[in-house]
Image (cartoon, rainbow, N blue to C red):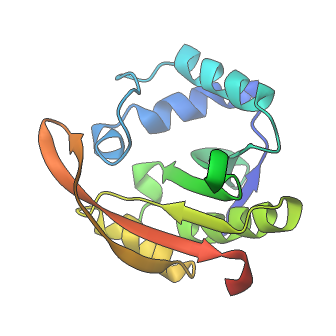
Amino acid sequence: MTCSIREWELSDARDLSIALSNKKIQDNLRDGLPYPYTEQDGADFISAMLSADENDTFAFAVTVDGKVIGSIGVFRQGNIHRQTAELGYYIAEEYWGRGIMTEAVKQICEYVFSKSDIIRIYAEPFAYNAASCRVLEKAGFQYEGTLRNNAVKNGKVVDMKMYSLLKEDI
């Protein structure tokens, strides 16, 4: 099953709301997302991504056979980290474990490195999210260490792992 990444369209809001109205997905993401996630929430997110500075925000829909199944984005950091960007992603549960997200991660990293001055892309999955860690490793990211007691998720203090990919690595 092959995937592609493409620019968001407002018509993607419904598919986005279906994918994100899943507690298993939200348990692996940062806080702040409404639950359930409505079509209007999706439209608001898509509008924000489409109007964002395209030199700082690289946000795409993840698609399989033309259907939106998830989201992936790389977000430039500031100040001394201005050539570093953070990666975030998710896909609908029924597509887990098929190598789709690994392919999407490779695609967005190649895009960002070729279209910007970004030299480092990093991700910080929760340490308990072994599948996300595997995605990063299969996409060529290097494990840099564990960020101990780095977040509070669902009322629990949790570790996160730090992974990075350098422009020179690809």
Choose between 126 and 38: the one closer to the eye.
126
Relative horizontal placement of residue 13, taking residue 123 as reference (left or right):
right
Relative horizontal placement of residue 147, taking residue 95 as reference (left or right):
left
Which quadrant of the rendered structure holds the N terminus?
A: bottom right
The structure residue drawn at horizontal position 82% and vertical position 45%, both measured from the top left corner, is: 55
The structure residue drawn at horizontal position 84% and vertical position 58%, both measured from the top left corner, is: 116
The structure residue drawn at horizontal position 80% and vertical position 63%, both measured from the top left corner, is: 111
In percent of width and height, residue 8 lies at 75, 37
In percent of width and height, residue 14 lies at 59, 26
Which quadrant of the rendered structure holds the C terminus?
A: bottom right
Residue at the extreme right of the image, as rendered: 115
The quarter holding residue 144 reads: bottom left
Relative horizontal placement of residue 100, taking residue 130 as reference (left or right):
right
Asked if 155 appears above or below 75 in the picture, the reply is: above
Relative horizontal placement of residue 145, taking residue 57 as reference (left or right):
left
Q: Would residue 146 be seen by someone viewing this image from the given angle?
A: yes
The structure residue drawn at horizontal position 46% and vertical position 48%, both measured from the top left corner, is: 92
Q: Would residue 97 be seen by someone viewing this image from the given angle?
A: no
In percent of width and height, residue 155 lies at 13, 35
In percent of width and height, residue 43 lies at 64, 20
Asked if 159 appears above or below 22 in the picture, the reply is: below
Please tell me how many numbered marks the rendered image carries. Answer: 0
Asked if 59 appears above or below 127 in the picture, the reply is: above
